[in-house]
Amino acid sequence: MDEIGERKDWWKICEMLRIAIGRRMKRKGKPNPSPFSSSLLLAYHSI
């Protein structure tokens, strides 16, 4: 697969995870994101 295709897939995965984490956070009512989601966002931005 080419680089652009890989990035699109990675973006889709990140978006799905972000939505899932957001829903979970809303349910728990936590104002701060978990270390897991923070590291995911950092990994995504470093690409």
Image (cartoon, rainbow, N blue to C red):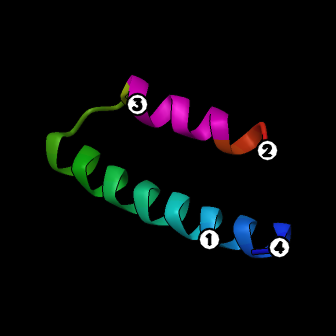
Q: Which residue is mark 1?
A: 9
User: Gap in Å between the C-alphas at discs 2 and 4?
Assistant: 15 Å
Mark carried by residue 36: 3
Determine whether, in the image, residue 17 is placed left or right of residue 46. Answer: left
Indicate the secondary structure of the residue bearing disc 2. Answer: loop
Q: Dot 1, how many residues are within 10 Å of its Cα: few (below 14), some (14-19), or many (20+)?
A: few
Indicate the secondary structure of the residue bearing disc 4. Answer: loop
Give coordinates of residue 15: x percent, y percent.
52, 64
Give coordinates of residue 13: x percent, y percent.
51, 63
Looking at the image, the residue that sits furthest to the top is 35
Indicate the secondary structure of the residue bearing disc 1. Answer: helix
Residue drawn 65% across the image and 36% down it: 43
Does residue 41 show up magenta in the picture? Answer: yes
For discs 1 and 3, the disc positioned in front in the rendered view: 1
Residue drawn 28% across the image and 57% down it: 23
Mark 2: which amino acid?
Ile
User: Gap in Å between the C-alphas at discs 2 and 3?
Assistant: 17 Å
Q: Which residues are magenta?
A: 35-43
For discs 4 and 1, the disc positioned in front in the rendered view: 4
Query: Residue 41's image quarter?
Result: top right
